[in-house]
Amino acid sequence: MVTPLKKFKLRYADATLFFGEKSIADLEAWVRGKQIIGLVMSRSAAKTSGALQEVLEILTTHNIVYVPFNDVTPNPSASQAVSCAELFRKERVDSIIAIGGGSVIDVGKTVSLLINSNLSPSDLVKGVRAEKAIPLAAVNLTHGTGSEIDRYAVLTFEETGEKRGFTARYPEVSIDDPRFTLTLSRDQTLFTSLDAFYHAYESATSSYTNMFVQTLSSEAAEIIANNLPETVENLKSIEHRSRLLYASMIAGISIDIALTHLNHALEHAFSGLNPNLPHGEGLAILGPRIIYHVHKAVPEDSAVILKHLDPSIRPVAEDAEKAYTAVKEFQRKLGLERKLSDYGFGPDDIPSIVSYTMKMIKERYKSTPLIVNEDVIKDIILDAL
């Protein structure tokens, strides 16, 4: 029997997060005094999860007008953020509630920065800061990205196929209500949880890691290792969902502090070219071979996480192959069998992706804890094809 987690309130950076069943009620204090709220959503998840209905009940109680935008897709494009900002500007929206997973929350963050400025998403990627953002709340529907507690957003630029992460902002208020994760499919449950696992692994092995990050990341990895296998077999377990949601959230804090590195740099290249590749699945396909190379470089940091998959993994470079096998087998037992070739990628794609990834690591992923050359990237891609 798994004991349900108790509700709690967390203040981190500029965000106030409410965690636990029926924590959506804590959104009520935030909406008071607002007049026109824009709702950022995907096409169905907000409604299917039940979150939209509960948000609308709160808005109706306070006679607040709402403007829906429900065109956000997985691996969202910069043009979606621009279209949403244009709609909200036209309707004089004064605040935003993003109801969804990482893609939706990332668009909500971006739109809150664009709406009262002349900036574009490209400006934000370049580090140009908006002078004034409008208020933003996030109602999180997945246990994957941690976007409800971190300051980052990721968008794909259609004209180039580049998927770029950038510093955006924290939501003012975030809701982590595990009830809204119960409608995630088996694949969504698996992919989002593995996204959180790789957040824990990359932040713990980042060149910017520290004791606090490793404490959070180790806890997150242990929770995922212990709870994900049962959750994918019992999708309606609120207890296991609560734990995975908690793991995702604390792994979100970890990457907010210590960042991600090689896996995210490489995966963004693939899902930027093919947005049908789920982000978490892309990380998982590439992840085992990346872990092989990372464990060789920083075995002590790597073992902090991997001991939860295989306690016999030692903090020594010689156990890199064992690290690779442990992650590969963990994912295989969960049913993750697809390869990059299932999404249309082949050997002909390697040169351009190697070139792009090398550029990204040099420019944006200084957190990478090993010296990466073209041979390393080719080895990772060939293993994933």
Image (tube, grey):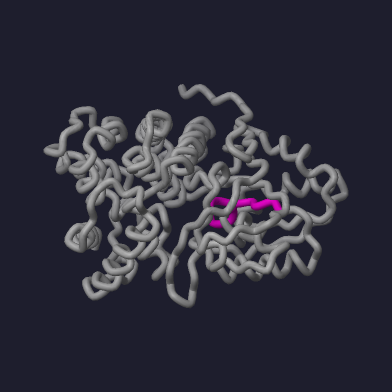
* Left or right, residue 293 beside residue 164: left
Residue 313 visible: no
Q: Residue at x 22, y 37 (%)?
A: 299
Residue 346 on image: x %, y %: 25, 71
Queried whether the magenta region covers residue 99, the answer comes back as yes
Q: Is residue 164 above or below residue 257?
A: below
What percent of the width, then of the height, locates residue 137? 68, 47
| Number of marks | 0
- The answer to if 167 sits in the magenta stretch is no
Q: Is residue 257 left or right of residue 11?
A: left
Q: Can residue 257 be seen in this view?
A: yes
Asked if residue 367 is positioned above or below residue 211 in the image, the reply reads below
Q: What stretch is highlighted in magenta?
A: 96-105
Residue at the extreme bottom: 159
What residue appears at the point 57 percent right and 37 percent down from the top-left corner?
178
Tell me which residue sits at (25%, 50%) in the image. Answer: 290
Name above or below for residue 163 compared with residue 233. Answer: below
Query: Which one is in front, 248 or 95?
Result: 95
Q: Where is residue 77 in the image (x, y as percent from the top left)?
A: 53, 67
101 shown above or below 217 = below
Name the residue: 63% across, 69% down: 82
